[in-house]
């Protein structure tokens, strides 16, 4: 890996570490109450008193960005984790299932993959209704097909590996050989993909919240904050810019780390 790539990867890891600290210890980083309303301090620009300025209600934008990390990132990570687990189960079972079952599962997967993930999530939320829980479910459903497809391919690949065949020859029961030697390898492959998928899920969560389908005011959430400042963008740019930067940096950093992990898994060093 070149020096420039190492620097970019290091910066990405640093950003993710800061975002994780914001999500886990918001009150330490930003002690101010993100819900505290102070009309007299409304729409104040960034200053020593308010690092990211204040919104229309006088709430501290810095505190709201920090406290919003837990929801914005948390929902995305949860959705990705659920999609990985469900994709692993469906994909691995499809790989060893009878041909008709496998064909039906793959056709459904192909149909879902034909549409952008955000569009699928939007349709699911429209059916289930708005709310953080439904947003998590929608993003999970939208992300599952990618993991199903990869899990199916990887299961068949690992099932034909030499060490698996050797285990069977030595008398290891097929189910035991499958769970001990095939599934761990599949999980490793899916985990690398999930690192990139986290960024996509966070972006989808922010997009749904921006449309008013996720958390509602006064809950601090990046997509909702981005939406709340769009009408005063010309005079109070900081209300939308800072949560927008948080989303952008998180997604880019997760993608950079994910691609680095994928390159390492594929044996590439450049």
Image (cartoon, rainbow, N blue to C red):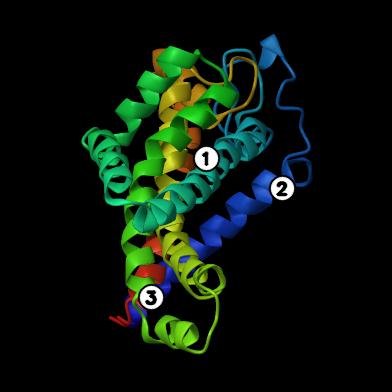
- How far apart marks 1 and 3 lie (CA) works out to 24 Å
Residue at screen point 43% across, 86% down: 163
Labelled pair 1, 3 in contact (Cβ < 8 Å): no
Q: Residues within 10 Å of mark 1 (few under 14, many from 20)?
A: many
Q: Which residue is mark 3?
A: 265
In the depicted view, which residue is nearer to us: 105 or 38? 105
Can residue 212 be seen in the rendering of this structure? no
Q: Which residue is mark 2?
A: 24
Residue at screen point 28% across, 39% down: 104
Q: Residues within 10 Å of mark 3 (few under 14, many from 20)?
A: few
In the depicted view, which residue is nearer to us: 256 or 49? 256
Instruction: Check disc 2 and report its element: helix, strand or loop.
Output: helix
Q: Is residue 134 above or below residue 14?
A: above
Residue at screen point 33% across, 66% down: 156
Q: Which residue is mark 1?
A: 79
Q: Is residue 178 above or below residue 210?
A: below
Of labels 3 and 2, the one closer to you: 3
Q: Residues within 10 Å of mark 2 (few under 14, many from 20)?
A: some
Of labels 2 and 1, the one closer to you: 1
Label 2 or label 1, whichever comes before in sequence order? 2
- On screen, residue 81 versus residue 169, left or right, reads right
Quarter assignment of residue 103: top left
In the depicted view, which residue is nearer to us: 206 or 82? 82
- On screen, residue 128 versus residue 94, left or right, reads right
Can residue 24 be seen in the rendering of this structure? yes
Residue at screen point 53% across, 85% down: 171
- How far apart marks 3 and 2 lie (CA) works out to 29 Å
């Amino acid at each position: 890996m070149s020096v420039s790539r190492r620097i970019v990867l290091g910066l990405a890891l640093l950003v993710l570490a800061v975002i994780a600290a914001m999500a886990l210890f918001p009150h330490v980083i930003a002690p101010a109450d993100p819900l505290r309303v102070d009309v007299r301090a409304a729409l104040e620009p960034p200053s020593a008193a308010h690092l990211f300025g204040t919104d229309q209600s006088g709430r501290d934008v810095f505190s709201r960005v920090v406290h919003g990390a837990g929801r914005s990132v948390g929902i995305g990570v949860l959705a990705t984790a659920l999609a990985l687990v469900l994709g692993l189960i469906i994909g691995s079972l499809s790989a060893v299932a009878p041909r008709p079952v496998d064909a039906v599962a793959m056709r459904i997967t192909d149909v879902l993959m034909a549409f952008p993930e955000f569009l699928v999530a939007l349709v699911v939320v429209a059916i289930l209704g708005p709310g953080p829980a439904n947003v998590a479910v929608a993003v999970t459903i939208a992300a599952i097909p990618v993991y199903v497809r990869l899990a199916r391919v990887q299961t068949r690949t690992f099932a034909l590996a030499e060490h698996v065949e050797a285990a069977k020859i030595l008398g290891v029961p097929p189910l035991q050989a499958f769970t001990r030697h095939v599934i761990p390898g599949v999980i490793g492959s899916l985990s690398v993909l999930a690192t990139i998928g986290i960024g996509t899920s966070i972006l989808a969560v922010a997009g749904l919240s921006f449309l008013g389908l996720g958390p509602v005011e006064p809950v601090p959430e990046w997509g909702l904050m981005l939406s709340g400042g769009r009408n005063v963008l010309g005079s109070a740019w900081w209300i939308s810019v800072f949560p927008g930067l948080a989303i952008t940096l998180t997604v880019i950093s997760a993608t950079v780390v994910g691609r680095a992990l994928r390159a390492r898994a594929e044996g590439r060093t450049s």
